[in-house]
Image: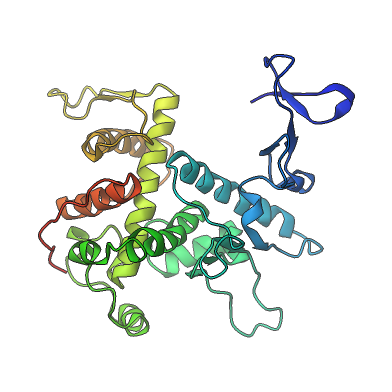
Amino acid sequence: MALEPAADDKGWLAIGDGVDAPLRFLCTNAEYDVCNWLVPEGSADVLCVACRYNHVIPDLTKAGNQELWRRLEQAKHRLFYSLLLLNLPIPTRAENPTGGLVFNFPEDPENGEGKVMTGHDEGIITIALREADDAEREKMRVKMEEYYRTLLGHFRHEVGHFYWNILVRDAGNEKACRTLFGDHTQDYGMALQQHYENGPPAGWQENYVSSYATTHPWEDFAETWAHYLHIVDTLQTAVAFGVAVSPTVAKDGSLSHAFNFDTYAATSFKELLVAWPPLTLAVNALNRSMGQPDMYPFVITPTIAEKLRFVHDLVHGLPLVPVAPAPQ
């Protein structure tokens, strides 16, 4: 929204609102140029709904750290946009001291001893500051042989672990989840070691959205969760811009689609699944025309679609339909 100063420069009003419209105030982090979200009049918080979940931020006395923090916040705010539209629970650390959500953005030790690991631990999400450095992140993407590695992808993946705790473990859905994703009680450390030593199993593309998803059922769920958020948010952007895909090469209309539904409110996963391939094919073609890699270098197989449908049903509180376990 566009804003104009209220009387006496106390707060802001949305342009076009009436004289009795509520005042809004900029998040305190606006002074660092890392946030442009607002706080409603009467709020007890000076930070916006996204910034108040921060615990550790970068040392802003160091050159370049403010820009890296800005990039982290842009991705994190995009994450919160999705969580809010999906009406997902977002307990704070104050509300749940042992499992509430909190974010840390630490940098690697200056003495060179070890590196900060990006990950999740009972609601604490750590994103290594170096991930906001494009060159460092690309170096890791190539080294790890990943198709896709972005800041937003990190946030969506790690919050997937957080929601496994809330929507699977704490909601009594472990059995249903195990049917699709495998036995999460297997040793995680050993599974991780085997993955890095041996790589993914042959033919993994049939059952997993990424090679990293083959590591352990927890990682499979988190990768699928992140992928679901990619789909819903990208489709909604297409809706907002009135995109329509109707390539002349598909004479049967199989790749044609007009995007005109609320993707965040869609209770039918099939509706999302039908709309997704035409859009990704079109955007991949546009990227290639600019000499860029495919925006969407993935293929959704029937097994992966079932896993995505499971996440969709979890998010919308729908009954979890039992399915036959996929080969792992």
Q: Is 81 positioned to the left or the right of 110 in the image?
A: left
Query: Residue at the spot x=26%, y=72% of the render?
Result: 200
Query: Residue at the spot x=44%, y=32% of the render?
Result: 237
Q: Residue furthest left?
A: 324
Q: Is 223 positioned to the left or the right of 326 in the image?
A: right
Residue 321, how many percent across, how many down?
Answer: 16, 51
Q: Residue furthest right?
A: 8
Looking at the picture, does residue 101 appear above or below residue 291?
below
Total label count?
0
Coloring applied to the structure:
rainbow
Query: Residue at the spot x=75%, y=65% of the render?
Result: 59
When asked about the image quadrant of residue 72, the answer is bottom right
**Who is closer to the viewer here, 72 or 46?**
46
Looking at the picture, does residue 317 appear above or below residue 106?
above
- Name the quarter where the N terminus is drawn: top right
**Whether residue 287 is visible:** no
**Whether residue 34 is visible:** yes
- Name the quarter where the C terminus is drawn: bottom left
Residue 220, how many percent across, how many down?
Answer: 30, 64
**Who is closer to the viewer here, 64 or 285?**
64
Residue 194, how many percent across, how many down?
Answer: 30, 82
Residue 272, how many percent across, how many down?
Answer: 27, 37
